[in-house]
Image (spheres, rainbow, N blue to C red):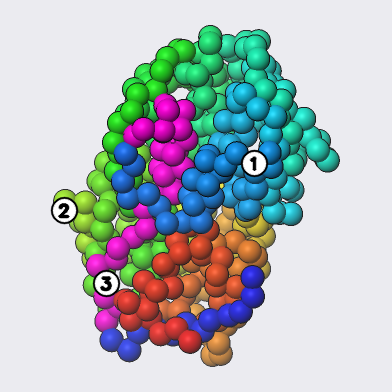
Amino acid sequence: MSGSIKLSRPTTTLSLNVPLTSSKSESNRALLLNELGGGNSELKNLSSARDTDTMTKLLAAEAYTLDVLDAGTVMRFMTAYLAVGKKERRITGTPRMCKRPIKLLVDALNDLGAEITYENEEGFPPLLFKPFTTQKTSQLTIPGNISSQYISALLMIAPTLPKGLTITLEGEIYSRPYIEMTLNLMKHFGVSGKFEGSQITVASQDYQSNSYTIESDWSGASYWYSLFALADDAQIKLQGLRSISNQGDHAIASIMEGLGVQSTFDNETVTLSKTEIKQKLVIDFKSCPDLAQTVMACAAALGVDLEMSGLESLRIKESDRTAAMATELSKIGAKLEEHADGLWILTSPKKLDVTEVIEFDTYDDHRMAMALAPLAMKFDCIIHEPEVVVKSYPEYWEHLEMAGVIIE
């Protein structure tokens, strides 16, 4: 991707009833559950994200080779789906995707009875699949601190296995809300599972057809919380969000209270208002790692120091997100450092001293672009490779313009 855009603050009040894109996390799960249940469910308000478009196309594809592009969720969900399939298949992705580890999921699926091999380097895509024939075990033990997408991928295929599946999670469980989202959606499509302590059990059973309306995306909402926090004057309403949500990134509503934003819920609409800003926040992101970049950028511009944990998975996302944020936030005088035992400290400038246009790199990472863009509420900035937002929120720049942000 190439090109750049320049962002400047609105000349009037930042104002919009934001028609958020739908949740990519819910959409991709619902698509797979519908396919596993025979494909007859009515899914409403599917995400417009490229990842969801990719998932839709691959589930319908008959080709031997399936290309997930840069969609990590699609790679993990489709790996589980193909592992229990009846055909020989191959799955691949972009060069960066083929550097993202998948060994733990492949090992688990092979333990269950799948036949998956690596085309090139062990532990990384591309992957080759033989037809599934016999289930070898119904018991798996895997670390609780791995990506919840591995666990969700295994859970969604669990009821299709002749013996069902019990997963024991060892150690601390990260991204628990996403595991619970998966189980809640499975329940909506007729499959019951039990999550007690560190053990999840799903018996062999059939998925049922059912209609489902996808909620708006709380990850996408997070950028509007940041824009609102950084704007001197703003009137923002976010549409299609539920006060009780399946999405882990719903946590942005409580996190942002410390950064000066209050949420009022009314009928799936959230109205934002200003409240007092704290000087320092302590945040554990293990249940919502996708919010970390948004919160860091916002805190840095507000002069709020952060003490953070739960950032381990950020190194193996679309970019090494901790390294990328350290580099980009240093351009405005903030310092992001890793300390002992998974602790990260963000030291923010007490007064923003930006006298020229700041250029931000996005590292081929949609969340870098969208997390850094709200800084335009404080100073003019240039975002390189703005097209990366198509991965999860294609309308992002259009919505910013609608709110009054000046984009050149």
Name the disc covering residue 266, or none: 2
Decide whether residue 33 is among the magenta residues.
yes
The magenta segment = 13-41
Name the residue located 61 percent from the left edge and 17 percent from the top edge: 140
| Residue 334 pos. (x, y %) | 57, 70
Name the residue located 32 percent from the left edge and 57 percent from the top edge: 257
Type of residue at label 3?
A: Leu
Q: Nearer the viewer, mark 3 or mark 1?
A: 1
Count neighbours of disc 2 (C-alpha within 10 A) and say few if under 14, some if 14 to 19, many if 20 or more.
few
Q: Secondary structure at mark 2?
A: strand
**Is 132 in front, or is 121?**
132
Q: Secondary structure at mark 1?
A: loop
Between the C-alphas of marks 3 and 2, the distance is 16 Å
| Residue 65 pos. (x, y %) | 69, 42
Name the residue located 62 percent from the left edge and 24 percent from the top edge: 86
- Judge whether 328 appears above or below 22 on screen: below
Count neighbours of disc 1 (C-alpha within 10 A) and say few if under 14, some if 14 to 19, many if 20 or more.
few
Count neighbours of disc 3 (C-alpha within 10 A) and say few if under 14, some if 14 to 19, many if 20 or more.
some
Name the disc covering residue 49, or none: none
Q: Secondary structure at mark 3?
A: strand
Q: Identify the residue under disc 1.
A: 63
* Quadrant location of the N terminus in the rendered image: bottom right
Q: Identify the residue under disc 3.
A: 16
Type of residue at label 1?
A: Ala
